[in-house]
Image: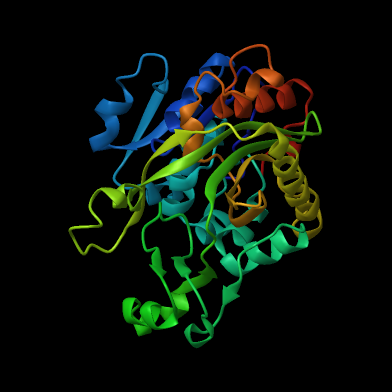
Amino acid sequence: MINKRIKIDYDKEKIAITTICSHSSLQIFHGARQEGFRTIGICTKEQERLYSSFPLASPDRLIVVERFADLLQENIQEELLRENAIIIPHGSFVEYVGATEILSSFSVPLFGNKAVLPWESDRAKQREWMLSAEIAVPKAYSDIAAVDGPVIAKLSGAKGGRGLVSARNGQELANKLDAKMLDQYTIQEYIFGSRYYPHYFYSQIRSRLEILGIDRRDETDIDELYRYRDFIDHPPSYVVVGNQPLVVRESLLGKIMKYGEGLVETSRRLFSPGLFGPFCLEMVCTADMKFVAFEVSARIVAGTNLYPLGSPYSPYYFTEAMSTGRRIAREIREAASQNRLDEIIS
C-alpha cells in the first residue's frame, strides 16, 4: 500500500504537472510552463532524447521507466506523491496503464473525475450516457444477422483507430470478423457525412463550458482511398496518424454547445460530481446538418495538438494564447489559489 504518511502539499508553487510522454504531452508541458508550474514527464529510455529536445516543452524532469504500466509500482507512485504531482490523463495514459488499474491501484491525484473511466471505456455505457443527454447516436446492432445496411465495428478503448472494420452489409461483416472475437466488437450503423471532433472544456472553477477547438482526424489509409481504389483491391484501415484543423459553420455552433452541455449535465446524475476538464465528442454532420455522435473521449484528445497557441475559438474566451494544455494548467492554478483543488482532482 502507498505510504499514507506522505504529506501532499498542493501549494501552487510546489505542484508538479505530470503526464506520460505521449499523445498530447508536449502541449501539456508547454501549457504548464506558461502558467508557471514545474513539470515531470514519464518516459521510456527510447523517448528520453526526444522529450529532452524541445526547449519550451520539455519537462523539467524525466522519470524513465521500462514500460508505462510501471506507474502502478508503489515506489514510483510514492516518488510522484513526494513531488506533489498531479497527473494529467490522456489517451495513452488510459490505454497503457489501464482504466481498471487506475481506479483500483493508482493513488497519485489525477486532474478530472476517475469515475468517468467506466463510462468512457465501455461503449454500451457511453451510448447510455449520450442517449440520456438527448444526443443523436447511430443505430446499434447486437447480432450480425440483424444488420440491414452499411456498418462499422469497433473494439473498446482508445485504440487510435486500430481494429475498425467497415462493411456494406451483415454478410460482408461476418466474412471480415473472426467469429471468436465478435463479443469484443460494438457494431454501429455507418453514418455518412463530415467528421467533426469539438474540443470542450468544462470549468468547475468558473462554472462554464468552453469550446476550445475542432479537428478532424487523418486516418490511414481510408482518407487516401480515392488515390488507389481503382487499381488495387485493398481493405481500408482507419489508423489515426494525424489531425486537421476545422472551423464549423457558425450557425451549427449552438448544436455543438448543446451536446456538450447535455453530456456535462447528465454526467452529474450518472457519476457524481460529473464530467469536467477537457473532453471531446466524435461526431458526423449529415447532409441535412444534423449531428450524430458515436464516441465520447472524457479527457484531452490529440486533436488539440493543432492549437498550441490557441484555436480560432479560444480568443473568444481568453486574451492570451490558450491551448487545451494551458487551459488545464490555468484551471489547476485558479483552483489552488482559491483552495479548491479537491474539486478538480480525484
Q: Quadrant of the C terminus?
A: top right
Q: Position of residue 327 (x, y in %)?
A: 62, 26
The residue under the point 72% across, 36% down is: 251
In the picture, measured across the screen, residue 278 lies left or right of residue 100, that is right
The answer to whether residue 171 is above or below residue 158 is below
The residue under the point 65% across, 62% down is: 137
Q: In terms of depth relative to the viewer, which is nearer, 9 or 306?
A: 306
In the picture, measured across the screen, residue 17 lies left or right of residue 235, that is right
Instruction: State the image quarter where residue 241 is shown.
Output: top left
Colour scheme of this structure image?
A: rainbow
Extreme-left residue of the structure? 231
The answer to whether residue 92 is above or below residue 22 is below
Q: Quadrant of the N terminus?
A: bottom right
Q: Position of residue 80 (x, y in %)?
A: 50, 36
Q: Position of residue 130 (x, y in %)?
A: 70, 59
Q: In terms of depth relative to the viewer, which is nearer, 13 or 219?
A: 219
The residue under the point 67% across, 55% down is: 115
The residue under the point 45% across, 69% down is: 153
Extreme-bottom residue of the structure? 145
Q: Position of residue 99 (x, y in %)?
A: 52, 57
Instruction: State the image quarter where residue 56 is shown.
Output: top left
The answer to whether residue 280 is above or below residue 292 is above
The number of numbered discs placed on residues in the rendered structure image is 0
Instruction: State the image quarter where residue 344 is shown.
Output: top right
